[in-house]
Each structure stands twice: as structure tokens, then as C-alpha cells.
């Protein structure tokens, strides 16, 4: 089993992100993998110490959002993470028009042979099955997050908030 904490849209508000990390760890256990879906992608570096205190071998991955500017050129707009036997497509969503449709995101995930797609941008928690399972953890600066436990490619999903 791989335990994942997924967040998005922290927008530099580190105290809220720290509270999300602590609450998620208390409720679901320390994460093995932390995924940030953009708009605050570099915020993971600022909470690295708190994450490593929970799990010294935690892996953190992020994608760049529309508000991730200076200093984020090294962060991709899209990526695929592998965990617990599942392939997870990650994108902020602004390049996939997620405020009006999920189908471009669904297509992008399916084309990369992923069973899950994570996005942010809308600041609204979301879960819908299309050809892949589409998930949005919501807005970290508002205390929203997603906890996933993936075993043999099957996710157990918790959309949660503080």
C-alpha cells in the first residue's frame, strides 16, 4: 500500500499547508508520497522538514500552475506519478480547461495509460469517474486535501478538509 497526500492551490500560504499535512497524517497516517497540483508548487520545499519528520523517505512531486511564476521553470506543467500499482496523471488543469470540462484532462490521462488524474485550479474538491478517475483535492489554503491509499492499483479515496 502507498499512502498519498494530494494538495493544490496553497498559493504560498504555508501555515495552512502545514495544518493540512498534520491533520492528514493524524487521520490517515504519514504519507509516502505528496503530490501538489500547482499554484504553490514550490511550497512543498518550504514544508519539507515537517514532511520528513513524519516520513524520512517521503517523495514530493509537483506540477506548475498558472500562478506559479518566478523560480518554477524547472517544474513541469504535467507529469505522471506511479504509486501502489497505479499511474497517476497530474496537471494543474488550466491548460485542460477544467473550469468548463473534464474531458481534455481525461483524454490526457488515458493517452498516458493512467487510471487516475489529479488536478487543481478550480479550488473545488471534485471526484468523477470518466474513462479514468478524475480527482481535485480542492484548495489547500482553505484546508482542503485528498488522501489516497493505493494497493495493487486500487485507490481508497478520502476528500477531506480541516
Image (cartoon, grey):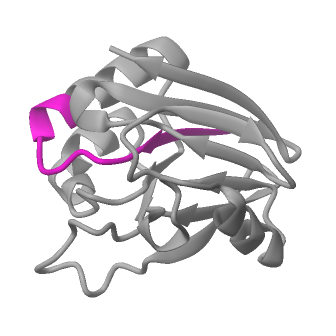
In the picture, the quarter occupied by the N terminus is: top right
Quarter of the rendering containing residue 54 = top left
Question: Residue 117, position in %: x, y?
Answer: 66, 55
Q: Say which residue appears at 33% left-offset and 37% top-offset.
A: 139
Total numbered circles: 0
Q: Residue 82 sits in which quadrant?
A: bottom right
**126 in relation to 130, above or below:** above
Q: Depth check: give the residue in front, 114 or 107.
A: 107
Residue 37, magenta (yes or no): no
Residue 1 visible:
no
Q: Which residue, as the protein is rendered here, is positioned at the far front?
A: 100
The stretch of residues the image draws in magenta is: 1-17
Residue 89 point in image, percent of width and height: 65, 64
In-front residue for pair 150/120: 120
The percent coordinates of residue 69 (x first, y second) are 16, 76
| Residue at image point 35% right, 60% down | 38
At 71% from the left edge and 61% from the top edge, which residue is drawn? 103
Residue 47 placement, left or right of 1: left
Q: Is residue 28 visible?
A: yes
Determine whether, in the image, residue 90 is placed left or right of residue 107. Answer: left
Outermost bottom residue: 73
Amino acid at each position: 500500500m502507498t499512502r498519498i497526500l494530494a494538495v493544490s492551490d496553497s498559493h504560498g500560504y504555508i501555515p495552512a499547508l502545514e495544518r493540512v499535512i498534520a491533520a492528514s497524517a493524524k487521520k490517515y497516517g504519514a504519507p509516502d508520497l505528496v503530490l501538489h497540483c500547482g499554484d504553490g508548487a514550490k511550497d512543498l520545499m518550504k514544508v519539507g522538514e515537517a514532511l520528513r519528520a513524519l516520513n524520512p523517505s517521503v517523495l514530493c512531486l509537483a506540477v506548475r500552475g498558472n500562478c506559479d511564476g518566478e523560480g518554477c521553470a524547472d517544474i513541469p506543467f504535467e507529469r505522471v506519478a506511479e504509486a501502489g500499482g497505479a499511474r497517476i496523471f497530474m496537471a494543474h488543469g488550466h491548460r485542460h480547461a477544467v473550469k468548463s470540462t473534464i474531458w481534455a484532462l481525461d483524454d490526457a490521462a488515458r493517452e498516458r495509460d493512467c487510471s487516475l488524474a489529479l488536478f487543481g485550479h478550480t479550488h473545488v474538491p471534485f471526484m468523477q469517474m470518466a474513462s479514468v478517475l478524475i480527482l481535485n483535492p480542492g484548495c489547500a489554503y482553505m484546508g482542503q486535501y485528498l488522501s489516497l491509499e493505493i494497493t495493487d492499483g486500487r485507490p481508497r479515496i478520502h476528500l477531506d478538509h480541516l
